[in-house]
């Protein structure tokens, strides 16, 4: 297999692994009852720092979130717009990859700007201002705290896990 095909296959495999891991971690958080509380903590959201390491994480996170939302029985607006929030966050994390401290900011901001409206229109969660606060806190824990712990852990093994792409 030539090098270009090999690289494309590796990108696809990484994206699929990230998507599968996102789904599994979402199911774990759901089973623990912490993914749908007032402050939602999804372990899978920690993975949103992965575009810092690899562009394969962008489609992987989007597909993982899409599948997780479908498989956990979310409303259609949540499936569509929640997954788009993850895609937007992943894309901008990749764009800001030169500064590791910025890695969790795009997914936090995209979720804070989109998900409260999803909660309002898909599930009738009110008041809207409270959803902005609770989503911000949950994303700060999931992406900011857990995501940065993951980033620093993976950074130690970066060359083995994420060869230059």
Image (tube, helix red, strand yellow):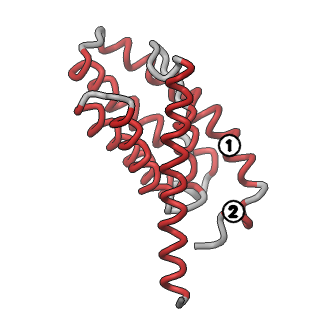
The furthest residue to the right: 156
Q: How many marks?
A: 2
| Residue under the point 63% across and 50% down | 100
In the displayed structure, 158 sits above or below 40; it is below
The furthest residue to the bottom: 2
- The circle on residue 160 is none
| Residue under the point 42% across and 54% down | 91
x, y percent for residue 143: 56, 35
| SS type, badge 2 | helix
In the displayed structure, 74 sits above or below 103; it is above
Circle 2 residue: 161
| Residue under the point 73% across and 54% down | 155
Seen in the image, is 126 located left or right of residue 13?
A: left
Q: Residues within 10 Å of mark 1 (few under 14, many from 20)?
A: some
The furthest residue to the top: 127
| Residue under the point 37% across and 35% down | 71
x, y percent for residue 73: 33, 28
x, y percent for residue 129: 34, 14
Q: Nearer the viewer, mark 2 or mark 1?
A: 2
In the displayed structure, 69 sits above or below 159; it is above
Q: Residues within 10 Å of mark 2 (few under 14, many from 20)?
A: few
| SS type, badge 1 | helix
Seen in the image, is 63 located left or right of residue 122?
A: right
Indicate which disc, 2 or 1, sits on the residue closer to the N terminus.
1
Q: Quadrant of the C terminus?
A: bottom right
Give the alpha-carbon distance from disc 2 to disc 1, as whole Å. Answer: 13 Å
Seen in the image, is 152 located left or right of residue 125?
A: right
Circle 1 residue: 150
Q: Nearer the viewer, residue 32 or 43?
A: 32
């Amino acid at each position: 297999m030539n090098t270009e095909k090999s690289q494309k296959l590796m990108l696809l495999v990484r994206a699929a692994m990230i998507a599968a891991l996102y789904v599994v971690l979402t199911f774990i958080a759901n089973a623990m009852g912490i993914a749908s509380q007032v402050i939602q903590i999804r372990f899978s959201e920690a993975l949103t720092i992965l575009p810092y390491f690899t562009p394969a994480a962008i489609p992987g996170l989007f597909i993982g979130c899409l599948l997780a939302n479908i498989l956990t029985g979310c409303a259609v607006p949540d499936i569509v717009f929640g997954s788009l929030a993850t895609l937007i966050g992943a894309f901008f994390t990749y764009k800001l990859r030169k500064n590791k401290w910025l890695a969790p900011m795009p997914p936090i901001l995209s979720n804070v700007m989109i998900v409260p409206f999803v909660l309002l229109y898909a599930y009738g969660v009110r008041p809207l201002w409270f959803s902005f606060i609770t989503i911000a806190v949950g994303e700060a824990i999931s992406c900011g705290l857990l995501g940065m712990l993951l980033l620093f852990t993976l950074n130690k093994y970066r060359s083995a896990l994420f060869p230059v792409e």
